Each structure stands twice: as C-alpha cells, then as structure tokens.
C-alpha cells in the first residue's frame, strides 16, 4: 500500500518511515497541509497517517480534500492530544483509525494490517457483486414498457422511506428483483437483505424461521435460533408470497408491523427490531379477506405503498428484453449471436408467456446454447413457443355440424398465425387485447 505520512515533526516522520518501509510499503512524507495536498495531487495513496496538529493548521481540515482525491483512502489519525470530542469529529469526517503518541512499531504494524484486511474484504465484496451482476441479468428492471417505467419511478421515490411496500404480480414478473432494488436504493443498502418464503414451511416452522426460537421450544430445537427478523436487523426483510402466510401467524406479523416487537418461539422476552419490510404476492388478497383467508387489518398495514408489475404478455418491449438476454447469454457461452430470424421474433411476440420473465430467460438461454448459426431460429426455441397452426378438418368448415366455440377457436388461431403482434390480431378480430388474452387462455392458444 502507498502510505503518506503527514506530520510537522521530522523525528516522527523519520520513525514512521523506517517502520512502514520495513513492512514493505512505499512511503512519501509531508510536513504541512499544503505539502500533503501537493503530494496527493501527484499520486494516489492507500493510507494517510495524519497528525492532528500541523503547526497552525489542523489535520482534520485535510480529510475532505484528501478523500476527494482518493475516496478509498484510509486516514489514520496520529496524535498525543486525543479527546472523545476530537475522536468523534474525526470519525464523522472519515477517519479510519487512531494511532496515539507515543506509539510502538507493533502498533503501526497492527493498524496497517487492519487497513489491508478491510481493503481486502471490500475488494472481495465488489468482486462478488460484479460476478453476480454478470451472472444474473436483471432484465426485469430494464426496457421501455411504460407501466414498468412508472413502477420503477415510484420505487425510486419510495425507497428512501421505511414505509411497508406490497409488490403484486404474477409469478416470474420480477417482484423479487424489484424488492432487492428497493433495498439497494434505500437508506439501508449496506444492511442485510433477508428473504422469507412464506409457502415453504409448516406454520410452526415458519414462525420459528421468521422470529427465531429458544432451545427446547419444540422437538429438534437443540439450540437457540435468532430467526430471520434478527438476521435482517438494519436492513430489509422480504416476505415472498405473503398470501400464503398461515392465519395463525398473521396476528403476530401484524403486531410486528405495528410495534416492531416480537417474541421468539418458547420465550417470553420481548425483542425489538429495526427492519424495512417488503412483501410480495401473486394472489388476490382482497378476495382472500372476503373469504376469511387473510386479515383485513394486516392487508392495510402491508400495502402502505403498493406496486403492480405487469405480466410479460402485456409489455411492449419483449423484443428488446429478448435481445438484451441474448447478448448476455452469448457472452456466457462464448459465441457470436447477432439476433433472431423474423420467424423466431414473431414466435416470441405471439407467445403468451405464462412463466413471464423467468420463462423468457430460460428460453433465450436454451436458444443461445443450441443455435448453430449467428441467428436464433425457430428450431432453437422451445417447442411450446413455436407457432401451432394445424390444418382444420372438414368438420370445422362453416355450415358443418360444429359448435360456434370450435369455429371461434380456429378463427383466432389462424389470425394469430397470420399477424405479427397480439395488438394487430385483436384489431382484426374487433376485440380488445385483454379479451383476446382471455380467449387464448380459454382455448389454449
């Protein structure tokens, strides 16, 4: 690490230089505030050992300009006149650590080792984040669909506040990705993001998973468990598929939302928690309230802010998303893929995408692996996406003994096969796109 020593006493600078260079770190010196800034302008430093008293200047005044030059700089204060107030002021301004005078070579080595360890951890986190970004294309948060853009704009406005958020949408529309984005845009981005999958466990085990338990609370509880509420402290707790939360747990979650207090299973000790809560569902919670499957007061607490992600079939940017995914998977498999044939593009546009973005991602990944040429063709797509246009039998001819339903289904199938978009097909049929969607679902088209 490149180390800058800033002290107006030559003996201190000399002692520090000998110690730091003996540890293998290159050193530059400065005896004043002005000289330190000149050194920082010429090269980037990893560590600055700064005396608080520099003649008539204060070392604290160096923090802002030094950090502006090198944001990752670790500033270690060296002083014989430290007080609690000075220490707090230095930490607020960005000090990494203190080195009290008189110091020993062992103390200098220890503080530099701490700097190196923290830098290494930060580098590892940055590397992992970059690897995740490259391995998981979050196309859910991209594109030009107006409804998606509106939801993302709302999410950015809401994220800095700790109000509960309810995300609605079908499976695979990107609710989990949006929940993570809310966490990243919040005031808690450095805190944990913890997911609780509500349908995954029995009511008893889900309560333990959520709130924790004491040893001996139930068979198999051989040690204390903190639970995911405690794990999310200072961060975000994401309750996925909240509509599947058992009725027996709903009053406890309601109390937690209202008071931020809870008890672990098998304990009477009340605990407090500081978490931001985001929930998601693909179910009609209002209908569940009417049928007695979900508490109305809990619903009101959950949907302080509500956002609905549209299904893929209603988005206008399917082609854009498909191309984005193709570029990503082409890099992953090490191939040069330029796009889709017109027939493949039409098949992607016509498919109803019941699995939404998750299904699109899987289809494009498969195509990138199987493609023989630079373009993705129909043969590279999953069979369920391919156009299905069987020839009608004689019984489907007008005037034959055939139901109106069968004729309608065949007519819609032919129109879909002869048009390039669902909107165009709906216009020809004289119905709105939502009606066309229901007809397609009804007839399995």
Image (cartoon, helix red, strand yellow):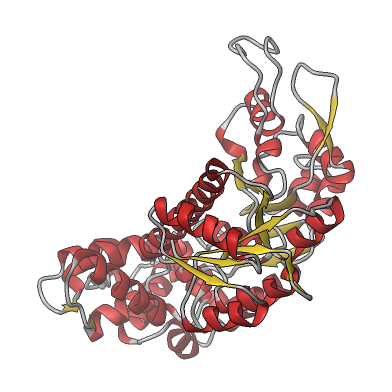
Q: In the image shown, does 406 or 415 lie closer to the viewer?
A: 415
Residue shown at the point (68%, 60%) measured from the top left: 95
Quarter of the image with the C terminus is bottom left
Can residue 399 be seen here? The reply is no
Q: Is residue 117 above or below residue 183?
A: above
Q: Is residue 17 above or below residue 198?
A: below
Give the residue displayed 26% in from the left and 73% down from the top: 389
Q: Quadrant of residue 414?
A: bottom left
Q: Which of the two residues, 433 or 299, is positioned nearer the viewer here? A: 299
Rendering coords of residue 240 (x, y %): 61, 47
Question: Which residue does the image show at 53% across and 56% down from the upper left?
Answer: 16
User: Where residue 43 sits in the image (x, y, percent)?
Assistant: 46, 78
- Could you tell whether 33 is left or right of 5 in the image? right
In the rendered image, residue 264, in percent from the top left (x then y), is placed at: 76, 25
Q: Is residue 300 left or right of residue 246?
A: right
Q: Residue furthest front?
A: 11
Place residue 310 in its image quadrant: bottom right
In front: 329, or 64?
64
Q: Is residue 218 left or right of residue 399?
A: right
At horizontal 56% and vertical 62% (from top left) the residue drawn is 13
Quarter of the view holding residue 379? bottom left
């Amino acid at each position: 690490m490149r180390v800058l020593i800033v002290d107006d006493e030559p003996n201190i600078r000399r002692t520090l230089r000998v110690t730091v260079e003996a540890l293998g770190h290159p050193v530059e010196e400065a005896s004043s505030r002005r000289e330190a800034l000149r050194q920082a302008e010429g090269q980037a430093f990893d560590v600055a050992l700064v005396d608080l008293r520099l003649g008539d200047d204060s070392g604290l005044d160096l923090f802002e300009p030094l950090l502006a030059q090198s944001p990752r700089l670790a500033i270690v204060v060296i002083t014989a006149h430290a007080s609690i107030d000075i220490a707090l002021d230095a930490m607020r301004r960005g000090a990494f650590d203190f080195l009290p005078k008189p110091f020993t070579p062992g103390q200098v080595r220890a503080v530099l080792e701490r700097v190196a360890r923290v830098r290494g951890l930060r580098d590892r986190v940055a590397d992992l984040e970059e690897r995740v970004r490259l391995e998981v294309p979050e196309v859910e948060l991209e594109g030009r669909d107006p409804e998606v853009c509106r939801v993302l704009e709302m999410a950015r406005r809401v994220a800095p506040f700790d109000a509960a958020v309810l995300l609605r949408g079908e499976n695979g529309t990107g609710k989990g990705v949006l929940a993570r984005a809310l966490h990243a845009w919040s005031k808690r981005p450095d805190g944990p993001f913890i997911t609780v999958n509500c349908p995954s466990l029995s009511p008893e085990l889900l309560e333990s998973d959520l709130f924790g338990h004491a040893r001996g609370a139930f068979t198999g509880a051989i040690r204390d468990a903190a639970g995911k509420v405690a794990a999310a402290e200072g961060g975000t707790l994401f309750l996925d598929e909240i509509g599947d939360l058992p009725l027996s747990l709903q009053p406890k979650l309601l109390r937690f939302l209202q008071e931020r207090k809870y008890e672990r299973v098998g304990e009477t000790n009340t605990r407090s928690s500081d978490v931001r809560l985001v929930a998601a569902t693909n179910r009609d919670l209002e209908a569940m309230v009417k049928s007695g499957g979900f508490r109305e007061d809990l619903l009101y607490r959950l949907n302080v802010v509500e956002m609905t992600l549209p299904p893929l079939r209603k988005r206008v940017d399917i082609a854009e998303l498909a191309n984005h995914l193709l570029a990503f998977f082409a890099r992953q498999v090490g191939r040069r893929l330029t796009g889709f044939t017109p027939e493949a593009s039409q098949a992607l546009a016509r498919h109803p995408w019941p699995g939404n973005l998750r299904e699109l991602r899987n289809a494009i990944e498969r195509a990138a692996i199987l493609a023989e040429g630079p373009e993705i063709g129909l043969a590279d797509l999953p069979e369920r996406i391919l156009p299905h246009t069987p020839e009608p039998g004689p019984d489907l001819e007008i005037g034959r003994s055939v139901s109106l339903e069968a004729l309608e289904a065949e007519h819609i199938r032919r129109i879909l096969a002869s048009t390039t978009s669902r909107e165009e097909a709906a216009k020809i049929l004289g119905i709105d796109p939502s009606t066309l969607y229901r007809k397609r679902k009804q007839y399995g088209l």
